[in-house]
Amino acid sequence: MEKEIDAKMKLQNSSPPRNNMTANANAQISKNFKFRAPMEKFSIQDFELGKIYGVGSYSKVVRAKKKDTKNVYALKIMDKKFITKENKTAYVKLERIVLDQLDHPGVVRLFFTFQDPYSLYMALESCEGGELFDQITRKGRLTEDEARFYAAELVDTLEYIHGKGLIHRDIKPENLLLTLDGHIKVADFGTVKPMEDSQITVLPNAASDDKACTFVGTAAYVPPEVLNSSPATFGNDLWSLGCTIFQMLSGVSPFKDASEWLIFQRIVARDVRFPNYFSEEARDLIDGLLDTDPSRRPGAGPDGYALLKRHPFFRGVDWHNLRSQTPPTLAFESKDASWNSSVTKDGSRRKNDENNGHTTSSEAGSITRLPSIDSFDSRWQQFLEPGETVLMISMVKKFQKLTSKKVQLILTNKPKLIYVNPKEWVVKTICWSDNPSELNIQVTSPSHFKIITPKKICSFEDVKQRAQQWKTTIEALQNR
């Protein structure tokens, strides 16, 4: 397994060239390219792992403190087996190479990478202020001055990214992180697309083979031209900018609806409903950014970002000294809203099995709100109520007599336990109770567990071996 992944992840292109000219060019690019962020020979045991920042289909991001230097990073941990199985190798390489070459205060920095037989690791800048999404959620909605500040920093960063010939393709509040003092950092370049004239050096075997019109991103922020399979342009990110500004000012995305299909219908129809408290300037800017013709969006035309920056909404913004301005005050999660699942009711500490026993930080047992469900897969959003957030989510096997089927098991802070059949879109609710005699979790192996209620026993298998974590999290909610 290790030899296979190393061969596939090797940055030197070893595939047979089509001709000598291509071979010479590829060899020259690979020979001259040097990573700014080094590939280190670290081990995961060199770090104290803390709270989970987010979880994706083949990766998770955790807070990690280097034991010797005490430096804190956002450590992106990627599953090698999944990457090779799902042919994601080129995407992982591309994200690593792009982050290595970007140098802007509005882009998260990559410090170093390393690997072991099972995982690839990227040590990224840790943004202790959390997500912009968190600020919107905690405040309900932002004031126009707050939204203007964040929008200006995002515009400045997008101008830099587009100037490098890159389309981000997943701009949304969950991917906009905040430093502890409140400045914006664009994160998650896993869907980035270099254009033909990109200034970024892309190694020969690190270019993704998808087309620029391939559907990527998050449903609520996807522009109509991508839904119509038109080639992507920088205007795609400007549409997402408009959606993000709308969400900052209103608290919800402009095309929010009960299902992904309904969201797409509203996007194609450009069904935008502006709240009456939006200022004329805000409404006009968003209206322009959500133009169905990507070439007419402010920032995409012949005048480029100069026209966007001159918009009345940004009146008074000092574009030359953005990062020296005082950011809005951050709203942090109240202590009453958080709890530690590693502590039992009598105060004793449970053993934490996460990360195969490598978690040593006192923060490791903290169950903090994961990013909104949009950060994982927008299909599951329709099963959440407004303000409801996810504590755990996993694709598991549900056993019934001699058969089994895959379902999405979701635990929320309501609290609510549901599982969804992803083929039939049927949702079933497991009756919640704070009484352990009415809702009990039995772990039979690292992967297998049962959720027992008076009327039903549900047996599950979590291939990621998180049976104990499901039990611990559910019991902590019952004891809160």
Image: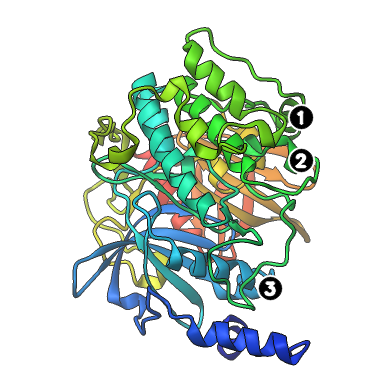
Task: Estimate the spatial distance between the alpha carbons at disc 3 and disc 2, rounded to whole Å.
Answer: 27 Å
Q: Position of residue 98 (x, y in %)?
A: 50, 65
> Is there a contact, CB below 8 Å, between mark 3 and mark 2?
no
In screen coordinates, is 223 left or right of 98?
right
Please indicate, yes or no, whether residue 429 appears anywhere in the rendered image: no
| Residue carrying label 3 | 85
How many discs appear? 3
- Dot 3 lies on which element? helix
Task: Estimate the spatial distance between the alpha carbons at disc 2 and disc 1, rounded to whole Å.
Answer: 8 Å
Query: What residue is shown at x 25% (from left), y 45% (from top)?
Result: 180
Q: Amino acid at mark 2?
A: Leu
- Dot 1 lies on which element? helix
Query: What residue is shown at x 61% (from left), y 35% (from top)?
Result: 239
In screen coordinates, is 454 left or right of 403?
left
Q: Earlier in the sequence, mark 3 or mark 2?
A: 3
| Residue carrying label 1 | 268
Relative vertical location of residue 235 with respect to residue 13 in this rendering, above or below: above
Screen quadrant of the C terminus: top left
- Dot 2 lies on which element? helix
> Is there a contact, CB below 8 Å, between mark 2 and mark 1?
yes
| Residue carrying label 2 | 227
